[in-house]
Image (spheres, grey):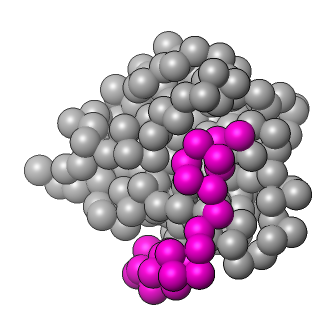
Amino acid sequence: MLTLDDIRDLFARHGANQYSGEPVTQLEHALQTAHLAEQSDADDELVTACLLHDLGHLLNDQGDTPTLRGVDDTHQFFALPFLRGAFPDRVLDAIKLHVDAKRYLCQSHPEYVERLSDDSRRSLALQGGAFDASQAAAFIALTSARDALRLRLWDDLAKQDGLRTPTLAHFLERAQRCVIAR
């Protein structure tokens, strides 16, 4: 199980890596996603999920732009065993479902696909493509679907070169309020 210090160290070691095919680093993307959630008055759990949603990329580094090599790193699942026990299910579920939220949006709002970056389109194909109607209905019925959809939309916007955000320390303070007491 990762501690907040471990998460800080992961971002210190790998946060400067380019976010696959985007004009931001892994850390900038995480901070921007959390910042967008915070600006929308999201609570601590959802802001924390936004900060940590791509932690699987840092834990399972597949090099630069793995989608160009046909690799789906299943990052939405990779971090969960490291975060389980440290954070509540609501944080974990939003992380786990943010890829399915993209697949849902592609099915329910066909114009959404056009707004995706090139790398997000490539990863969509590797992740199974847009949901069919029955998959979309099953997804939206999940208790955590709304959080995952909000996270996904902020995720899509969090690729802005030079956007100023609060620091990692600021968001780790919010995450601290979510840590499960042991």
Q: Nearer the viewer, residue 43 or 89?
A: 89
In the picture shown, does residue 128 fall above or below 67?
below
**Residue 40, percent from left and from top:** 70, 69
Where residue 67 appears, as percent x and y from the top left, is 64, 30
**What residue appears at the point 74 percent right and 52 percent down from the top-left corner?**
156
Residue in view at x 42 percent, y 24 percent: 60
Q: Is 127 situated left or right of 160 in this image?
A: left
Above or below — where is 138 with respect to 113?
below
To which quarter of the image does residue 8 belong? Answer: top left
The part of the chain drawn in magenta is 122-146
Residue 5 visible, this orientation: yes
Picture quarter containing residue 129? bottom right
Residue 129, placed above or below residue 61: below
* Quadrant for the N terminus in the image: top left
Residue drawn at x 87%, y 33% as measured from the top left:
161
- Asked whether, in this view, residue 51 is left or right of residue 17, the answer is left
As rendered, which of 14 and 20 lies closer to the eye?
20
How many marks overall?
A: 0
Classify residue 22 as left or right of residue 76: right
Q: Position of residue 113 (x, y in %)?
A: 80, 59
Q: Please tell me which residue is depicted at 45% across the width and 40% down the height of the picture.
A: 74
Q: Residue 114: image x %, image y %? A: 88, 57
Magenta-colored segment: predominant secondary structure: helix
Residue 169 in sight: no
Q: Is residue 42 left or right of residue 176?
A: right
Verify whether residue 63 appears in magenta. Answer: no
